[in-house]
Image (cartoon, helix red, strand yellow):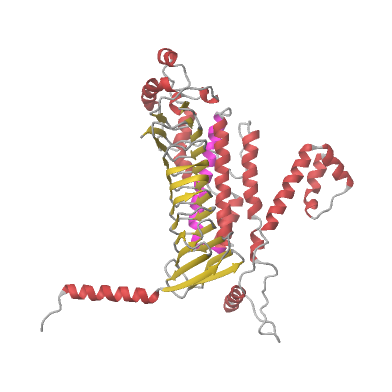
Amino acid sequence: MESIPRSRVITAVLTACLVSAAVAETKKEFRYVVGPNTVVSVDTQYGGISVKPGNDNEVLVVATLQSDKAEVDSRQIGDRIEIVSHLFEGADQQSGRIDYEVRIPSNATLSLRSSLGPLVVERLHGDLSVEGMDATVDIHDVANGHVHVNTMRGPVTLTNVSNGHVEVGTITGSITMKSVNGTLVRAVSGGGKISYEGDFGAGGDYKFATHSGDIVATVPAGTSADFSAHSMLGKVQHDFPLEPRHSHMASYQPGNAFVGTVGKAESSVVLRSFSGKIRLTQR
Amino acid sequence: MTCSDVRRVLPDIVDGEIDADFQAHLLSCPACSELVDDLNLIVSEAGTLAETDEPPARVWVNIANQLRAEGIIRDPEGNPARPLLVPAQPRRWSLWWLAPVAAAVLAAGSYQLTHWNAPRSAPQVAQQSPAQPPAATPAVTSPANQPAVVAQSSSTTSHTVNPPAQAAKHQPVPAPLPKAETEVASNQNASREVSPPNEEDQRFLSEVSERAPGMRSTYENQLRAVNAEILETQAYIKRNPEDLDARQHLMEVYQQKAMLYQMALDRIQ
């Protein structure tokens, strides 16, 4: 008898796995007609949420459920849409997982919450509030709104976020910012690292603070900012020819603090750490 | 009425019982007036937690069925369809205390930031003494690191607040870090491991265990991390009370702790 080739067996097994996975997954779609002041909130214990801009008068939610141990509770009150994952008894991280793909008006106000994530938001112009325990947060190409992010351990990445207020807080997660500018940019991490790559856009008030995480800021030569850096127990370092100015920080040891201006000092940049290293490097 | 009288009757103002003497004292005493304002704010903020929607009816039915299955409740005779245990108020009311606790954490941080000048005025949230050098943990910084600091400072004195020439010529070799600083640095690792939660933290973790048992370990680990940061910063401020940045940092760490409480409140309701 001719033996079955191993490759065929593997293919058959993989196909069976994919088919069973597809059968277990259930997709549900929700559409809502909304007005100009849309507020959308999505809350899922286990699962990721991805939000992109869609039609200006519609909210579209596609939920992917992994089992019947979870369901989607949704409701609309005027222009306010609330989506909540509801877990039944016995649900765990796998069976209770519901992933969401959401399309909202680009200027809608958005609130996301997930314990595990990931949480992805792109190309929006409204206010954002994102909260995750271990969720990875990725926000990019967002402008003109307040961006508020809180995680416990989840890393946060902001890319091309401009012309608004940005406040990011995490207990032990890392914060990575690329081309993030605004009138107010705050990033606080306890044990995580804060990385910034950009030009500290004109007129902004920037403050990065950690407890033990390092702070690394990489900026171009033409940056115009007033820099102040202090690490109580760590070391600070910079590549810039800072113009010194009077400051209360003169009492600190040079290796633990620096202060000075570059260019016209249009923005204020405050870098603080308890025991992490602070580096200001020139790109 | 004196200030101590005010503090004695303070709980009564929550119920709206204020007499003329009390009012008169508030008008003449800014400290008591501010205290009453803070209490009213906490009470009002806690009240907003109640203004949330009822959970779906199936939640209560499922809870009742589970309790019935475990024999904790029994249907009364003559009315088998009506469970004995029906919550009189939404479950979220029982967690209202977390909001004032979060506010209290922030208030404690604010108090420390503005009033800390005693050698040991540890707030409720930090009960472990930081000055316990571990037996074998090596120091994160040590006098051996100082030559590198000197070299760096010499190369960058032109860019620091010190006048360049004077700094290069006259800046003495910095003395090794004070022993206390090395102790704080070396204690960082130790304090992260041995900073147990206080009573309020324990109550917080108990609520998490009851409502979201799978999350307890995560919240507990994060709480330990934050408490360790609070201890480290407090220890530093003790030795450097004039360091304004350190006081500001302590406030930020308390804000992180309040954020942790708030995130738990949002999730376990």
Q: Position of residue B11 (x, y in %)?
A: 77, 51
Q: Which residue is found at the position 50% from the left and 31% from the top?
A: A266
Residue B236 on the magenta segment: yes
Of residues A77 and A114, the one drawn nearer to the viewer in this rendering: A77
Which quadrant of the structure image shows residue B91?
A: bottom right
From this view, report whether residue B7 is shown above or below residue A259: below
Q: Is residue B194 visible?
A: no
Which quadrant of the structure image shows residue B5?
A: top right
Q: Which residue is found at the position 51% from the left and 51% from the top?
A: A150
Outermost residue on the right side: it is: B20
From this view, report whether residue A60 is shown above or below residue A124: below
Residue A189 on the magenta segment: no
Instruction: From the viewer's perspective, tell me whether residue B36 is left or right of residue A282.
Output: right
| Image quarter of the N terminus of chain B | top right
| Image quarter of the C terminus of chain B | bottom right
Of residues B49 and B83, the one drawn nearer to the viewer in this rendering: B49
Q: Which residue is found at the position 80% from the left and 46% from the top?
A: B8
Outermost residue on the left side: it is: A1
Q: Position of residue B97 (x, y in %)?
A: 66, 55
Q: Position of residue A281 (x, y in %)?
A: 38, 33
Of residues B167 and B176, the one drawn nearer to the viewer in this rendering: B167
Determine the main secondary structure of the stretch shown in magenta. helix
Of residues A36 and A235, the one drawn nearer to the viewer in this rendering: A36
Q: Is residue A85 visible?
A: yes
Q: Position of residue B129 (x, y in %)?
A: 55, 39
Instruction: From the viewer's perspective, tell me whether residue B143 is left or right of residue A41.
Output: left
* Segment colored magenta: B211-239
Instruction: From the viewer's perspective, tell me whether residue B20 is left or right of residue A214.
Output: right
Outermost residue on the bottom side: it is: B78
